[in-house]
Image: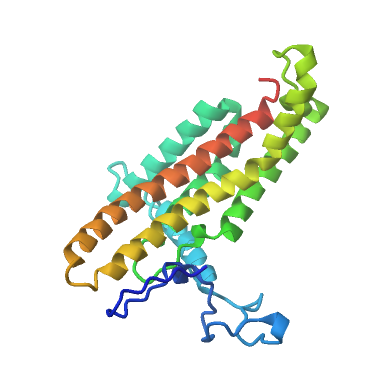
Amino acid sequence: MATEAQGEGSGLVFHPMDQFIVKPLFRDIAPGSCNPAAGMTDGCVRWYEPTNVTLWLALAALIVFALFVLGTRGRALIPSRVQSVAELTYGMVHKMVEDVSGKDALRYFPYVFTLFCFILFANLLGLLPKSFTTTSHIAVTGVLALSVFLGVTILGFVLNGAHFLNLFWVKSAPLALRPVLAVIELISYFVRPVSHSIRLAGNLLAGHAVIKVFAAFAAIAVVAPVSILAIAGMFAFEVMVAVIQAYVFTILTCVYLKDALHPGH
């Protein structure tokens, strides 16, 4: 998925989607050198190779660990800036879980909190120069969404048994419509991991691609000032998107968790 734009006489060529290519960390691969159908496998990324995705996922995990474990070891009465950020984040997610899923969902708060922090910092790290936005890949967001989907589904059956199926049976509807609504509810339930993952990946991919397009025009003197202003505005917008998308992913997780705990509501 490479987009080309070439200005007449200017030689301007840019590929906004190149920033999302998965590359090995310790060897260079030539573009187009991975084509298994033609017997060209030297340029393919092997499953056991550390890649730019591996690196930036690990950095996101390390930052979460540094902020919430190392940064709060002292737990001073007058908190430091790092401790204040950690406590505010903790309090916000704790309130979200309690308000959306109920007090009985607080036992699952550590998972929800870890999910929010990991996605947040993975999103923000993707805004650094020369970085890689891991959450722009459906392979990453799909695993996160699928873990939530399978987790709440298994939890729903473990806690409620067959009564978990009441989630799909709309008792408030007329009896004749209930089978039809049950099918619709069932389809919408299984679509959850798809929408959950695509929403996050799609928003980040689109925003970063737009920034790359604006950056390419910064090389043209006539439009450079407008391009730089557009980049600055888009970057600020992407910071907001990074935070909002982490919040949306987490609050949807809380909604799904509530369905698992209280399928009759």
Q: Is residue 257 left or right of residue 3?
A: right
Q: Quadrant of residue 230?
A: bottom left
Q: Quadrant of residue 10?
A: bottom left
Rendered-image quadrant of the C terminus: top right
- Residue in view at x 63 percent, y 47 percent: 194
Q: Is residue 69 visible?
A: no
Q: Is residue 58 left or right of residue 221?
A: right
Residue 127, placed above or below residue 236: below
The number of numbered badges drawn on the structure is: 0
Residue 50, placed above or below residue 94: below
- Residue in view at x 62 percent, y 29 percent: 258
Q: Position of residue 61 (x, y in %)?
A: 49, 60
- Return the residue nearer the eye: 196 or 187: 187
Q: How is the image coloured?
A: rainbow
Q: Position of residue 193 (x, y in %)?
A: 64, 45
Q: Quadrant of residue 164?
A: top right
Q: Is residue 238 visible?
A: yes
- Return the residue nearer the eye: 122 or 97: 122
- Residue in view at x 57 percent, y 29 percent: 101
Q: Residue reaching furthest right?
A: 162
Q: Is residue 60 left or right of residue 128?
A: right
- Residue in view at x 57 percent, y 76 percent: 50
Q: Position of residue 44 (x, y in %)?
A: 62, 81
